[in-house]
């Protein structure tokens, strides 16, 4: 997986540069994990179709597993999407500016994204904690514990928050 945008060759301080490299590696790793989760969801859908329509048997866990794995793939892949600039953005106003005003506008947008992701990460950790300690389950026929299903939201939102910090420190967009 290669970057779709290039990062400047500016050499930040050792600590900042190390942090950015660490986050880039973690984002790449979670992108591969996201791909594996997506593939697992596709394989389970195929298995579900086979069991249901070829064997004529009922399915109990496949739909829920697929929803969890594909949702986890989206959330775990989000730091990589931010790192590579693959996200959807409306940049008419910032692109019409140049120099310092453009940098300020991009920084404000990044700080707003960072604040949102930090709030989501915090709320997600609270949710996982409550699901774990409350023994919550999904309430379906399969009825697995809920915390493993919401944990990728927590990890994805946390890594996305940390990747936002890396992008702000990188000083681009």
Image: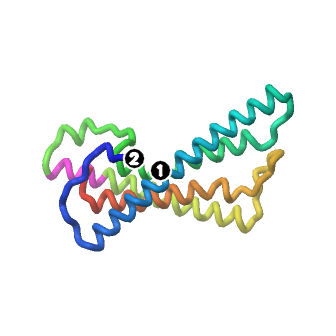
Q: Nearer the viewer, residue 93 or 136?
A: 136
Q: How many marks overall? A: 2
Report the disc number at residue 31: 1
Q: Could you say whether the residue bearing mark 2 is in a helix, strand or loop? A: loop
- Image spot of residue 150 (x, y percent): 63, 55
Whether label 2 touches label 1, CB < 8 Å? yes
- Image spot of residue 80 (x, y percent): 42, 50
Q: Nearer the viewer, residue 43 or 113?
A: 43
- Image spot of residue 152 (x, y percent): 58, 55
Where is mark 2, residue-wise? 1
Decide: is 56 above or below 15: above
Farthest residue to the top: give it. Answer: 53
**Residue at image coords 69%, 35%:** 45
Give the crowd class for mark 2: few <14, some 14-19, many >=20 residues within 10 Å. Answer: few
Q: Could you say whether the residue bearing mark 1 is in a helix, strand or loop? A: helix
**Residue at image coords 46%, 59%:** 159
Does the stretch in magenta take in 101?
A: yes
Q: Which residues are magenta?
A: 100-108
């Amino acid at each position: 997986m290669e970057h779709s945008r290039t990062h400047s060759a500016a050499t930040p301080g050792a600590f900042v540069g190390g942090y950015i490299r660490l986050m880039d590696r973690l984002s790449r790793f979670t992108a591969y994990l996201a791909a594996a989760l997506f593939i697992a969801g596709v394989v389970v859908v195929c298995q579900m179709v086979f069991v249901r329509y070829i064997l004529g048997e009922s399915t109990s866990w496949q739909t829920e597993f697929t929803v969890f794995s594909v949702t986890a793939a989206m959330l775990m892949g989000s730091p990589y999407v931010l790192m590579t600039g693959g996200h959807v953005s409306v940049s008419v106003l910032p692109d019409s500016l140049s120099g310092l005003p453009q940098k300020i506008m991009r920084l404000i947008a990044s700080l707003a994204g960072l604040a949102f992701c930090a709030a989501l990460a915090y709320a997600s950790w609270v949710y996982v904690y409550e699901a774990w300690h409350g023994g919550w389950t999904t309430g379906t026929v399969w009825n697995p514990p809920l915390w493993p299903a919401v944990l990728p939201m927590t990890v994805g939102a946390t890594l996305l928050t940390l990747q936002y910090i890396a992008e702000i420190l990188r000083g681009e967009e």
